[in-house]
Image (cartoon, helix red, strand yellow):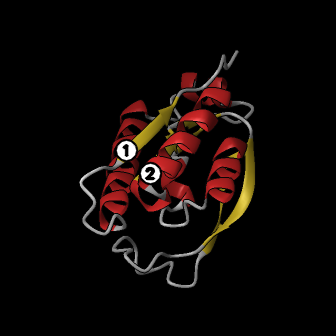
Amino acid sequence: TSVSLALVSHFTKRFGSENVGYIKAVGQQCMRVWDEPLDNDSNDADDEAGQYVLVDKDVKLIRDHFGLSHLRYQDMSPVLIPQGYTKSYLDGDINHHDQTADIRRAYLNIVKATKLGGNHNKHSITICEGTGHVG
């Protein structure tokens, strides 16, 4: 997380926060946050008023601290590994193909939102943070 903080800090200073994306594709320590729809949001019409979502705690820290309000929380933290995940996975309750598709969709949404917010700036970047040991 400290490396991601440094990278996001550098690139928001260099390119502006609207040109920086961030995703922690697999998170472990989650918290509940309010995710409002964005002006450029073409996703679900069902969540026009916003909704509570669970996200990795690092996502909330980075989004709030660096003003990445052009990104949806649910895109920044598409897969969570809560307690009991391994058992659910082994029992067949979790489909890794669905999770891979969720990560891909979220990443593409972030790239799109970052390019849209950039005022035609030719520079944009998305930081993809990994996760620590889940065991």
The residue located at (53%, 56%) in the rendering is 74
Q: How many marks?
A: 2
Q: In which quarter of the view is residue 126 placed?
A: top left
Of 69 and 8, which appears nearest the observer? Answer: 8
The residue located at (42%, 31%) in the rendering is 96
Query: Quick check: marks 1 and 2 in contact, CB under 8 Å?
Result: yes
The residue located at (53%, 40%) in the rendering is 10
Could you tell me residue 41's position as x and y percent? 39, 74
The residues tagged by marks 1 and 2 sit, at their Cα atoms, a distance apart of 5 Å
- Residue 125 bears which disc, if any? 1
Could you tell me residue 81's position as x and y percent? 64, 34
Vertical comparison of 18 with 3: above or below: below
Vertical comparison of 118 with 51: above or below: above
Q: In which quarter of the view is residue 103 placed?
A: top left
Could you tell me residue 25's position as x and y percent? 50, 38
Of 131 and 70, which appears nearest the observer? Answer: 70
- Residue 91 bears which disc, if any? none
Q: Is 92 on the left or on the right of 107, as rendered?
A: right
- Residue 20 bears which disc, if any? 2
Residue lying at the far front of the rendered structure:
14
* Quadrant (top left, top right, bottom left, bottom right) of the C terminus: top right
Residue type at numbered disc 1: Ile
Could you tell me residue 23's position as x and y percent? 50, 43
Q: Is 76 on the left or on the right of 112, as rendered?
A: right
Residue type at numbered disc 2: Val
- Mark 1 or 2 closer to N-term? 2
Label 1: how many Cα within 10 Å (few below 14, some 14–19, many 20+): some
Q: Is 118 on the left or on the right of 68, as rendered?
A: left
